[in-house]
Image: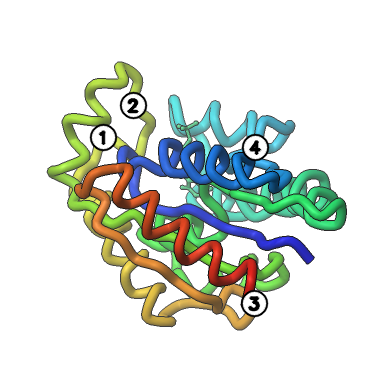
Amino acid sequence: MAPFIVIEGIDGSGKGTQAELLRKRLEGGGVDVALTFEPTRGPIGRIIRDHMKDPFLDDRTLALLFAADRIEHIEKEVSPALSEGRTVISDRYAYSSIAYQGQTVDPDWVGVVNSDALRPDLVVVLDMGSSEVRGRIEGRGTVDCFEEDLSFLEGVRDMFLSMSGGDHLPENLMTRFLVLDATEDPEKISDVIWKSVTSISSP
Ligand code: TYD
């Protein structure tokens, strides 16, 4: 089975850039890649994005919607690509649910509702402080409901770090973690990710 790689981190930590650099590198070596993301562009992803602009859902409802959107993502995009032998890179996955929804809802319950999600082979966490991402987020123009609150993002960051040590993870989400300093040069970060990906692809 081809590898399933997840890139996580707070908003503005450079996930999209790293996902794209990794895709180019893999494709340059002749590897077929499917680059995906959550929330998806599917019907549940659309409800989530509407909520993020102007919140109207209960926090637990939102956590369940993210989990439902993830099932759609796995069934319609991730699993089919992996069975065709394509390497999947996902910009966000279940770890975002535990980190973000886990700020206001019991993170262990969020783990439970994600306890049948497909296990990735590698989770890259792009670690950065909320004050460092402020400039990057503001530079984009539009901010979602989570991006506005830097202390909330600091809690999200802490949760990503504690998950990398195994906390709050259901069994299916335990895997290899690579925590990287997202303030480093993007090319340098990409080199480290590349090394880790090549080591899982050719064990
Ligand atoms: P993001 O990756 O920033 O998408 P976009 O680039 O389209 O804005 O994700 C949108 C927001 O969704 C982001 O603030 C994190 C949040 N999120 C959760 O709260 N839980 C989740 O499970 C996922 C996947 C994302």
Toward the viewer: 6 or 99? Answer: 6
> Pointer 3: residues within 10 angstroms few (<14), some, or many (20+)?
some
Q: Position of residue 3 (x, y in %)?
A: 67, 62
Q: Tell me the number on the disc at residue 143.
A: 2
Q: Earlier in the sequence, mark 1 or mark 3?
A: 1
Residue at image location 13% in from the left, 44% down from the top: 131
Q: Earlier in the sequence, mark 2 or mark 3?
A: 2
Q: Secondary structure at mark 4?
A: loop
- Please name the residue that numbered disc 3 is placed on: 172
Mark 1 vs mark 3, foreground winner is 3
- Please name the residue that numbered disc 1 is placed on: 148
Q: Callout 4, which amino acid?
A: Thr
Mark 4 vs mark 1, foreground winner is 4
Q: Secondary structure at mark 1?
A: loop
Direction from residue 25 to residue 4 in the image, left or right: right
Q: Callout 2, which amino acid?
A: Val
Q: Secondary structure at mark 2?
A: loop
Residue at image location 74% in from the left, 61% down from the top: 2
Q: Position of residue 50 (x, y in %)?
A: 54, 26
Q: Earlier in the sequence, mark 1 or mark 2?
A: 2
